[in-house]
Image (cartoon, helix red, strand yellow):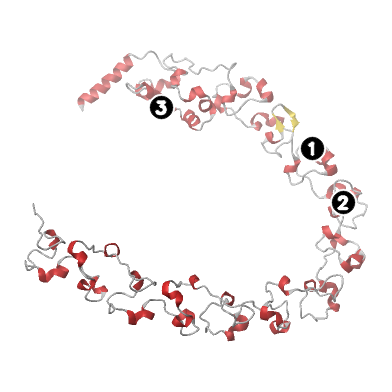
Amino acid sequence: MTLAVFTSAAAQEIETLVMPGEVISGHADIEADCSSCHKMFDKGAQRELCMDCHEEVALDVNAPSGYHGLYPEAVNVQCSVCHTDHAGRDADIVILDENNFDHSFTDFELAGAHRENECSDCHAAGEKHREAPGDCVACHDTESPHEETMGGDCASCHEPTDWADGQFDHGTTDYPLIGKHDEAACLDCHADHTFPAPPTDCYSCHKEDDAHDGRSGQQCGNCHNPGDWNDSSFDHVRDTDFPLEGTHATLACGDCHSDNPFEDEMNTDCVACHLEDDAHEGNHGDKCDTCHESTEWTAAIFDHGRDTNFQLAGGHAEIACADCHVEPVFEVKPSTSCDSCHLDDDPHEGTSSMQCESCHTEVNWQDPVFFDHGLTRFPLHGVHAENECEDCHTTKAFATTERNCTACHQDDDPHRGYFPERCDSCHTPVAWDLWTFDHNLQTDFLLEGAHIDVACEDCHRGPLEKMQILNGNCGSCHKTDDDHDGEFGSDCGRCHTADSFKEVRSLQ
């Protein structure tokens, strides 16, 4: 350890002795510590050490942004190529040719009138060039005639070529200029250059142009358009929620409106005008247009299939309205679910879905029933597909039928209940004798050697759950075969193989 310290100290002293000259004043405080800028015997590490101190430059390189991040030749070279130190305290190691500097390799490319500026117009003396602001108002705040009403995003309207050469798309505001408005000068509406948001309602600017003297309200746009005052374009069908059709089209405005039509709060419900004409005495609600047209009251146009969510088909088409609509039609709408009318007709005792149409048609309950058993939790496969419904379903309460195999096949079980009720673990619905069971894959006890030829009942002499508590040791089944009387434990497999007890493994 002492030798290592001596060697390091000696190396640092040697480096100090061979230092080519004083560093610049900015590095004077670290001049004595050569390792701040140099890594012994590794000149390539110098760039990384520079970045450790000059964090702003490192951020630019990684971004990339700024001159050091955008100028290709500054990205991958050693810093010392451009910034050579050890040239004395007063040396200027920033090599900057202002006359030939390409500003496009910065975050602020010079365009338009900016190209004519001197560097000192934007870069203050004694400050780093990177500290020059890039937003317009930083330099042009005193030149803005808009005061603070337009924010600092000057470029949204102005070009760097000339302040007066402004381009603004009024369509990006809440008031696009159309018609005559597009011909108006900016100061016709904006009294000064501060551009506060002026009123956008017609009356604020065109009060003196109102030939109606306010009688028709201040919503000029209801009848007029910005193309021409004299172009009255009001259309009751297009411009209101109440198109004048049929007999309504023959009425005069005064039949419904007062002298100031745009202040009227009109009730457009039929009964507002035709309550005395209602032959249904309110029993059918106030939606008269559901069944009647405006041309004639007696022309009923109601179509149950088109105008409701319940198509009358089959037996329903023969039913009178009052059979279902026992209360005012538009106050209480009958439920469209089958059980709302046919609950007493349900032979399934409520155990099946109330979506009767899943199996039955509207023509007749007794029509051929269609049902896909494959969509239930018990799809029919093999010989099950040949069964009649009543073979399994003893009542119409289908949902109560058991799904486990033993519910139907308990008498067919040759295993005397030794195995669980999951017959499908070994058997398929195609045939009982087509069974498949892999003891090696479906249990934790591999059948190897002599075990392969053993019959199932040789081991399974009782219910399976009792077999599952065995620990898998040989002694569980071969205790009586143990010539050692338990002296060597129950794990016979340490010495014997599954092929034969007589075959003993070598203990070497």
Tell me the kind of residue under disc 3. Answer: Glu
Is 277 rendered above or below residue 476? Answer: below
The tag on residue 388 is none
Residue 391: percent from the left, percent from the top? 44, 82
Q: Which residue is mark 2?
A: 224
Q: Which residue is mark 1?
A: 192
Question: Distance of mark 1 from mark 2, alpha carbons?
Answer: 28 Å
Nearer the observer, 93 or 235: 235
Q: Nearer the viewer, mark 2 or mark 3?
A: 2
Q: Secondary structure at mark 2?
A: loop
Residue 190: percent from the left, percent from the top? 80, 40
The residue positioned 74% from the left and 34% from the top of the image is 167
Q: Is residue 60 left or right of residue 237?
A: left
| Label 2 packing within 10 angstroms: few (<14), some (14-19), many (20+) | some
Q: Residue furthest bottom?
A: 344
The residue positioned 59% from the left and 16% from the top of the image is 100
Reading the chain from its start, which is encountered first: label 1 or label 2? 1
Is 412 rendered above or below residue 214? Answer: below
Q: Which residue is mark 3?
A: 48
Tell me the kind of residue under disc 1. Answer: Asp
Q: Which of the image's four quarters has the N terminus?
A: top left
Nearer the observer, 117 or 276: 276
Q: Nearer the viewer, mark 1 or mark 2?
A: 2
| Label 3 packing within 10 angstroms: few (<14), some (14-19), many (20+) | some
